[in-house]
Image (cartoon, rainbow, N blue to C red):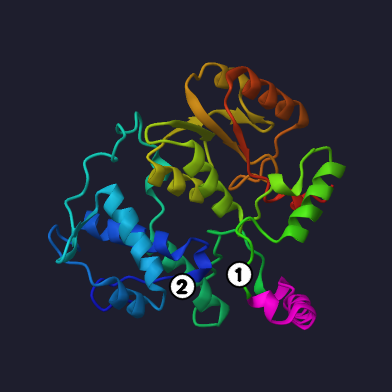
């Protein structure tokens, strides 16, 4: 915790530290706990207080400055600004979505802490943390992972601890390309990038394709991490209606000028719904007609046991 700002970092929430810092600073400015003109601690000091790297704090400050929450003054430091009246370089959203404003780091931390206290017997009232989709600790394959780690260190030695290629280890990309080819997707290892998870992959796609003010189509209930990424990109989020078989195609046909469509076809987060095969084919056909790329977040496909 920072002695001056009251910030905390929680590695269990599945959100990068720099984004946690971003969220908490914005929240404190909105609540009046950080008033305009307040000087922020030096990045080294804040990094030490939070137990993270200086680069993490610097990136958070850069994002906050770009969004208009902080101002860097040469030779003087970084200062809190008045809350921005609109997203930089983008018009305000046409309609505010209620779920884009309900995810706060403070609430997230409180839920996680209550679940932790229940797990170690400090509280008796039932509390199940449903914020993130992860298995119970007793189901995690700790011993298997330890054996894998031991094997890699024995076989590759110090090479295993060196920096890997940004696009991912070649042998892994080659194996993924082979598996994709067997499933009907023609690609090579050069077409693939290995990420640390779907969150990083979504962030990379949004950074590459979405400009401030662009419209991105999503399910009416969708992944909170996506909404945060789109909010930071200055995108306008447009929810599309659907049913138990997936997004409503006639509704998609009425939308023009969208930049992307984001779907989770298997075990959708948070509803658990699945898009039927005919509906998937209709989505692909619409995408080709409309010229709108589809982001397929298929992180939970392996949950299908049928």
Residue reaching furthest to the right: 182
User: Which one is earlier in the sequence, the residue at label 2 or at label 1?
Assistant: 2
Dominant SS type (magenta): helix
Query: Residue 265: x and y, percent?
Result: 68, 39
Q: In this view, does 269 lie above or below 49?
A: above
* Residue 277 part of the magenta segment: no
Nearest-to-viewer mark from 2 and 1: 1
| Residue 131 vs residue 29, the one in the foreground | 29
Q: In this view, does 98 lie above or below 50?
A: above
| Residue 266 vs residue 173, the one in the foreground | 173
Per the image, the residue denoted by label 1 is 163
Neighbour tally class for label 2: few under 14, some 14-19, many 20 plus, Cα within 10 Å: some
Q: Is residue 15 above or below residue 187?
A: below
Where on the picture, by quarter, is residue 85? top left
**What's the residue at 29%, 77% (across, down)?**
45
| Residue 71 vs residue 234, the one in the foreground | 71
Residue 113: mark in rendering: 2
Left or right of 240 in this view: 190: right
Q: How many marks?
A: 2
Where on the picture, by quarter, is residue 49? bottom left
**What's the residue at 30%, 49% (across, down)?**
66
Query: Residue 224: x and y, percent?
Result: 49, 49
Q: Is residue 9 above or below residue 192?
A: below
Q: What stretch is highlighted in magenta?
A: 138-161
Neighbour tally class for label 1: few under 14, some 14-19, many 20 plus, Cα within 10 Å: few
**What's the residue at 27%, 53% (across, down)?**
65
Query: Residue 158: x and y, percent?
Result: 68, 81
Where on the picture, by quarter, is residue 205? top right
């Amino acid at each position: 915790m920072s002695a001056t700002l009251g910030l905390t970092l929680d590695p269990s929430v599945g959100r990068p530290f720099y984004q946690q810092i971003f969220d908490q600073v914005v929240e404190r400015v909105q609540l009046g706990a950080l008033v305009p003109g307040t000087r922020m601690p030096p990045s080294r000091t804040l990094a030490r207080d939070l137990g993270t790297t200086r680069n993490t704090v610097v990136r958070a400050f850069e994002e906050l400055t770009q969004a208009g929450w902080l101002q860097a003054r040469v030779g003087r430091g970084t200062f809190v600004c008045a809350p921005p009246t609109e997203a930089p370089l983008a018009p305000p959203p046409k309609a505010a979505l209620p779920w884009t404003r309900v995810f706060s780091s403070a609430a997230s931390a409180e839920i996680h802490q209550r679940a932790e206290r229940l797990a170690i017997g400090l509280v008796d009232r039932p509390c199940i943390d449903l914020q993130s989709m992860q298995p119970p600790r007793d189901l995690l394959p700790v011993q298997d992972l330890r054996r894998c780690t031991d094997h890699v260190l024995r076989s590759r030695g110090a090479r295993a601890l060196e920096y890997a290629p940004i696009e991912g280890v070649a042998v892994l990309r080659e194996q993924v390309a082979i598996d994709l080819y067997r499933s009907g997707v023609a690609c090579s290892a050069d077409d693939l990038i290995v990420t640390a998870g779907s969150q990083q992959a979504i962030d990379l796609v949004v950074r590459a394709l979405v400009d401030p003010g662009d419209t991105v189509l999503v399910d009416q209930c969708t992944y909170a991490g996506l909404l945060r990424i789109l909010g930071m990109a200055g995108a306008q989020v447009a929810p599309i209606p659907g049913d138990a078989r997936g997004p409503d195609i006639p509704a998609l046909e009425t939308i023009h000028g969208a930049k992307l469509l984001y779907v989770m076809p298997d075990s959708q987060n948070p509803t658990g719904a699945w898009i039927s095969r005919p509906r998937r084919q209709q989505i692909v056909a619409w995408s080709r007609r409309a010229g709108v790329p589809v982001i397929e977040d298929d992180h939970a496909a392996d949950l299908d046991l049928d």
